[in-house]
Image (spheres, rainbow, N blue to C red):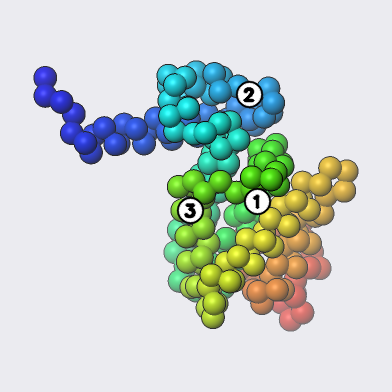
Amino acid sequence: MSPRSASVNEAMRQRSRERLLQATVELVEERGYEATTLGDISRRAGSARGLVSYYFSGKRALLQSAVHRLMHSELSEALEREPRAENGDELLARAIDAILTLTRTHTTLMRTHMASILQEEGFIQCPEQQRLAFLLRDTVERWGAEQPEEEYRLLRALLMGATVALLLPGAPMPLARLRAELFQRYELPWSAGQPPAEAPGLEPAGEA
């Protein structure tokens, strides 16, 4: 039997890594971060325990990579869904809606993620985070930002702030209100993206 080619080995490694990331999302959503062990994750993924340590420095790094992968997936799907959009306003609206909606549908995961990145070590520069950053940066560039890198950083900060506001225990801000503020900042029409149904009266002047 001939040995596997380098490309086949790389594809297998990538699939193993993807299974670990998906298992992390599922288990943290089901059990919470503290109750999920690396052994649990490797068993759910059908991988050897040693692979977790091979790919990730620890559980926090694994969590951040898993969330960034999920965010990239949701963002990609929103930007590419039919009908395909080329208009910069529509693309940015879809990006904002994708992140806000993800925060609402994956509350436990996103709350854990935000707590993780606020620790001293901050962001972990994993491949998933870099792909997410590239996609957001490309979106603000297509929107027409004069300084895409600076605008990307500002958008990232605004989305993080909105995420925290949505997740704040006991005093969450309504998604529609946060969306209205972000859309006003970027002069986006309320009808762009996927407007929430529960937001009468928040349309910018002239759109109602």
User: In the rendered structure, which amino acid carries the disc numbered 3?
Assistant: Gln
Residue 36: % across, % down: 63, 23
Q: In the image, what residue occupies the spot 21% across and 36% down?
A: 6
Which labelled disc corresponds to residue 130? 3
In this view, the residue in front, 117 or 33, is: 117
The reply, left or right, for residue 99 in relation to residue 50 is: right
User: In the rendered structure, which amino acid carries the disc numbered 2?
Assistant: Thr
**Between marks 1 and 2, how big is the CA–CA gap?**
25 Å
Q: In the image, what residue occupies the spot 70% across and 67% down?
A: 182
On screen, residue 57 above or below 151: above
Classify residue 27 by image quadrant.
top right
Q: In the image, what residue occupies the spot 74% across and 81% down?
A: 206
Which labelled disc corresponds to residue 36? 2
User: In the rendered structure, which amino acid carries the disc numbered 1?
Assistant: Thr
Disc on the earlier residue, 3 or 1: 1
Q: Which residue is mark 1?
A: 101
Residue 141: % across, % down: 50, 73
| Secondary structure found at label 2 | loop
Which labelled disc corresponds to residue 126? none
**Between marks 2 and 3, how big is the CA–CA gap?**
26 Å
